[in-house]
Amino acid sequence: MSEPAANSAAVPEGLVSAVVHLVDTGPVPLGAYTAAELTAVDAIVDFLETRPSADVLAEAVRSLAARQLLVAGSSGQQVRVRGDLGIAVAFQQRSQMVLDARSTGTVAGEPWRILLLPQPEPISLMVRIDALGVHELGLYTLEDALRFVAEWLPRGEEAHPGAAADPDALLASAERSALITVTRYTTRGSEEIAGASADLVLARQDGELHAFSRASADRATLAPRSLDGGDVRETLAGMLR
């Protein structure tokens, strides 16, 4: 096997197919990491809120090295990512789109943000981010991942499209709301280059679930929309097609 590029995952031949088969039997947890640790191995960097400072990154590298998740390659300019973190990086590098869901009104013990990175097979890398900034990674079947996200998002009986005269006012007073963005991207080395994207906004008020998307004429304006089949999960699945 050729030496990986800097900060690349060491992926033995056959590992991906073996992991995909394993996911078919149940979720595969890949551990929890800080934003600095993920940045140190160039994992989901383009989807993080802020880039950690140099001192924080240096401490993250020491922590990963102490756990033997980050080791030196044959060249002084190369490092290898090992273990569960290496698997996570490898699957991130295989994806060409990301579903980024952010929710308000979350409580302790649940994430405020979830990333799904679908794979060519019907599985997905899921990243759950809590209020402390801990990123919990795992691999799931795409069906299970979409079901998890749909159950976590605001829920309620679908409101009639157009029932909210002022989307901004509704979002400001909603019991719980969420922004879901699906972005397709290409990769150049370790860099993700964003392409086309689509948004879905959900808001629950008085037991009703309102849905919006960006207006085609003005991307800064929200326009009411219907859920596919009246179902959030089906709508998310449609955004990934």
Image (cartoon, rainbow, N blue to C red):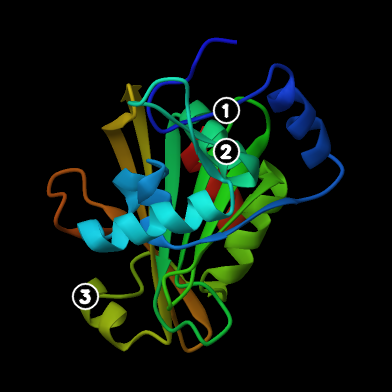
Mark 2 near mark 1, Cβ–Cβ under 8 Å? yes
Rendered location of residue 2, percent (x, y): 53, 10
Choose mark 3 or mark 1, whichever is in front: 1
Q: Is residue 173 above or below residue 9?
A: below
Of all residues, the one furthest to the top in this rendering is 2
Quarter of the image where one finds residue 56: bottom left
Q: Amino acid at mark 1?
A: Ala
Q: Which residue is mark 3?
A: 168
Q: What residue sits 75% from the left and 33% below the top?
A: 19
CA separation, marks 3 and 1?
47 Å
Sequence-first disc among 3 and 2 = 2
Q: Residues within 10 Å of mark 3 (few under 14, many from 20)?
A: few
Question: Residue 166 got which mark?
Answer: none
User: Which quarter of the rendered picture does the N terminus lie within?
Assistant: top right
The reply to whether residue 130 is visible in this rendering is yes
Q: Which residue is mark 1?
A: 10
Question: Residue 86 got which mark?
Answer: 2
